[in-house]
Image (cartoon, rainbow, N blue to C red):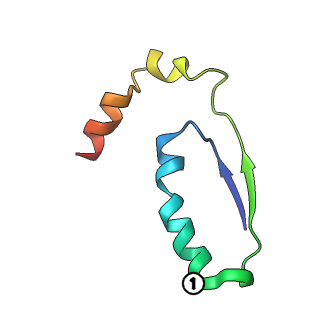
Amino acid sequence: MTVYNDAGCPWGYSVNPAFRVLEWRYGAQLDWRLVMIGLTEHAQEYVDRGYTPLRSAEGYA
């Protein structure tokens, strides 16, 4: 299984518990490959587009 993820993306980060469940259930039956990507060059680009930490938190409330 190849997982593409951006370490700075809150949605990419929030899926980690689901991956841990898959890892726990299937263990060595799954071959994991993590590929880290960057959706932007700088995290400030998210803020400039309106994706602030506060706005993200409000979306989960």
Q: Position of residue 18 (x, y in %)?
A: 50, 67
**Total numbered circles:** 1
Q: Position of residue 22 (x, y in %)?
A: 57, 75
| Rendered residue at 63%/33% (across/down) | 39
**Between 28 and 47, the one nearer to me in the picture:** 28
Q: In the picture provided, is 50 more to the left or to the right than 5?
A: left
Q: In the picture provided, is 22 more to the left or to the right than 27?
A: left
Residue 45, relative to residue 56: is it above or below? above
| Rendered residue at 53%/17% (across/down) | 44
Examine the image and state in which quarter residue 34 appears: bottom right
Q: Secondary structure at mark 1?
A: helix
| Rendered residue at 73%/68% (across/down) | 1
Q: Residues within 10 Å of mark 1 (few under 14, many from 20)?
A: few
Q: In the picture provided, is 37 more to the left or to the right than 47?
A: right
Mark 1 residue type:
Arg
Q: In the picture provided, is 3 more to the left or to the right than 52?
A: right
Residue located beneath label 1 in the image? 25
Q: Position of residue 23 (x, y in %)?
A: 61, 75
Q: Quadrant of the C terminus?
A: top left
| Rendered residue at 56%/36% (across/down) | 8
Q: Position of residue 57 (x, y in %)?
A: 31, 38
Residue 46, relative to residue 35: is it above or below? above
